[in-house]
Every structure is written in C-alpha cells, then in structure tokens.
Amino acid sequence: MSEEYVKKAAELLKMGATLLSDTCPMCNVPLIRFRGDVFCPKCGRKIILVRGESEAAAARTPIALADVEENLIAKILDVNVRLASMDDLDDIKKAGEVMNILLKTLSLVRKLRTG
Ligand SMILES: [Zn+2]
C-alpha cells in the first residue's frame, strides 16, 4: 500500500469517488469512478466500461495504439542517435530504410488514432 497511486486513489475516495470491481486492462488495478468518469488511478487512463469481448477489444485499441506510437517514437530517436555516428554508407542506407519504415508506421498509427 505504499505506491503513489494508492495514495491518489485514497484521496479521491475521500472526495466521494467510488472504487469499482472492474480493473484496468493495462495495470489490473481497481478502477475509480469520479465525477462521471471511470479511470485507472495507476496509469491515469480514462477507461470506457464495456460489456462483450468485441466491445472490450474495441475499447483497448486506442490504448494499444498510444503505446505503439510511444514505442515508435523511442525507436526513431534511437535510430537517429545511431545514424549520427555512422560513416559506412551501407550502414547509413540500412538505418535510412529502418527510419523510413518507422516514420511510415508512425504516420499510419497517428491516422488510426485520430480516426
Ligand atoms: Zn491502468
């Protein structure tokens, strides 16, 4: 009970929030309903409670895409750092190809996220 999110959750509960039996699909932490919104006290994500598995999958998609975008950006920065110290043209070509794929994928993910 020493983690930061537990304190946050306790504060919200004092302010009238409700602890739900549903858990965050990412952190498996009990969700909190506060002022009409349901969210995870650990990752701070707003959660849309759903019924069937297909609805659940649809609700998970934006969360998954946000994670994919985050990872892609990290990889792009990583390739960029490596590229800066490359001299060999074959290596640079390879890095360029990887960068191209990462940027195209990032663009696609952003399009999917914004609908
Ligand atoms: Zn969470």
Image: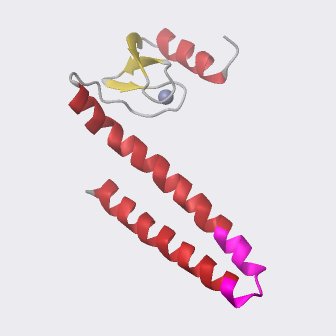
In the image, 32: left or right of 53? right
Q: Is 4 above or below relative to 45?
A: above
Residue 109 location (% of width, % of height): 38, 59
Q: Quadrant of residue 78?
A: bottom right
Q: Nearer the viewer, residue 4 or 75?
A: 75
In the image, 61: left or right of 41? left
Residue at 49% across / 17% down in the picture?
12
Residue at 36% across / 30% down in the picture?
47
**Which span is picked out in magenta?**
79-90
Q: Residue furthest front?
A: 90
Total numbered labels: 0
Q: Residue furthest bottom?
A: 89
Residue 3 location (% of width, % of height): 67, 19
Residue 96 location (% of width, % of height): 58, 80
In the image, 81: left or right of 19? right
Residue at 25% across / 57% down in the picture?
115
Q: Nearer the viewer, residue 45 or 101?
A: 101
Quadrant where the N terminus is found in the figure? top right
Q: Is 29 above or below relative to 71?
A: above
Q: Is 47 above or below relative to 114?
A: above
* Structure colour scheme: secondary structure
Residue at 22% across / 21% down in the picture?
51
Residue 110 magenta-drawn? no
Residue 106 location (% of width, % of height): 44, 64
Q: Is 87 above or below relative to 40?
A: below
Q: Nearer the viewer, residue 20 or 68?
A: 68
